[in-house]
Image (tube, rainbow, N blue to C red):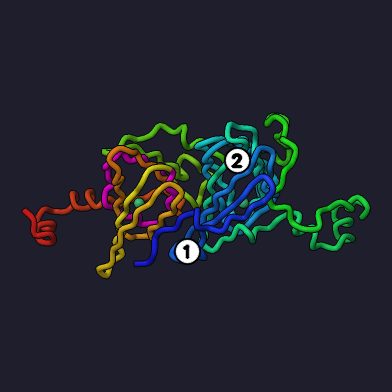
Amino acid sequence: MPNLKWSFTDSHMRLEEGGWARQTTTRELPVSTAMAGVNMRLKAGVAREMHWHKEAEWSYMLKGRARITAVDQAGRTFVDDVGEGDLWYFPSGIPHSIQGLESEVDGCEFLLVFDDGHFSEDSTFLITDWLAHTPRDVLAKNFGVPESALARLPEKEKYIFPAPMPGPLAGDRTGGAGPVPESFSHRMLAQQPTATRGGTVRITDSTIFPASKTIAAALVELEPGALRELHWHPNGDEWQYYLSGQGRMTVFGSESKARTFDYQAGDVGYVPKGYGHALKNPSKDQPMEVLIVFNAGDYQTINLDDWMATNPAYALQNNLQIP
Ligand code: MN
Ligand code: MN
């Protein structure tokens, strides 16, 4: 069985003035070909530069608040302030920006998940990088201004940098061709949790967050000793981020292969499409919380229990030699 675990604490940390970023991609966790993750911190006022990338971006706000902006292919705009437990989703190629806002943690920390494991946070298309690599006469002609107006353009990428705090959200909503038809943000933590036998689950897929066409997610809480029963997903890989507590997962990969991993807060777990798995909270007194992301717009799961229960009894008796 391939390795199915990586700790963000073992990832290279890109330190910038007022923020940092670290990633888990196929380079860190080779099995994770379908999804990559980035953990990012921006202090209040600190901006993640205007950029785009080929992969769609899904995000969960871990702590604090941020202002996010985007514009779609039809010139329709999106601006919102997001806080703890909020999501955003930017389709592939859609340009966007993020800026930390004042909060009890001085800015924010969030998790980004991309629908391709080969993504690299260091290879996004940055507005400064592009303009710095375009002849000045071309820029002047493009924008209809004299070259002298562009004298102070940055000579290289800014990526993460301190900036003045943005004003109130209401004043920041721009015209363009009107708002995007499907909001790029969603309040996941505000969803009513569904009770399970050993905890709770909130599921956010494209049926309730329509913009999120290529990513679905589940926020799972397991009580001490509880088990997320044996199951698999027929339509996507599973990328996990452990928020708190401990998890113990056994994954079955056919050909008599199986492996068990222990996870704790800050770890990434991975389950390839179709692989059977069960996740237990091994702790006697601590609850466990895990954010689970799938590279599919709709959430699909097949529980072993349900499959067995819908078979004729003789088939189960023949296969499992049990009464
Ligand atoms: Mn991005
Ligand atoms: Mn699963």
| Classed neighbour count for the residue bearing mark 1: other residues with Cα under 10 Å, few (<14), some (14–19), many (≥20) | some
**Left or right: where 302 falls relative to 144:** left
Number of numbered callouts drawn: 2
What separation in Å lies between label 2 and label 1 (alpha carbons)?
Answer: 31 Å
**Left or right: where 162 falls relative to 55:** right
* Picture residue at 93% right of the left edge, 52% below the top: 148
* Picture residue at 53% right of the left edge, 58% below the top: 11
**Could you say which is closer to the camera, residue 184 or residue 201?**
201
Residue 70 in picture, x, y percent from top left: 66, 45
Residue 293 in picture, x, y percent from top left: 44, 50
Magenta includes 232? Answer: yes
Q: Which quadrant of the figure has residue 243?
A: top left
**Measured along the vertical axis of the image, is residue 172 above or below residue 98?**
above
Q: Earlier in the sequence, mark 2 or mark 1?
A: 1
Q: Which residue is mark 1?
A: 33
Q: Which quadrant of the figure has residue 157?
A: bottom right
**Left or right: where 284 falls relative to 309:** right
**Left or right: where 91 falls relative to 74:** left
Q: Which residue is mark 2?
A: 181
Q: Nearer the viewer, mark 2 or mark 1?
A: 1
Considering the image in quadrants, where does the N terminus appear?
bottom left
| Classed neighbour count for the residue bearing mark 2: other residues with Cα under 10 Å, few (<14), some (14–19), many (≥20) | few
Magenta span main SS: strand
Q: Secondary structure at mark 2?
A: loop
**Measured along the vertical axis of the image, is residue 323 above or below residue 219?**
below
Q: Which residues are magenta?
A: 218-243
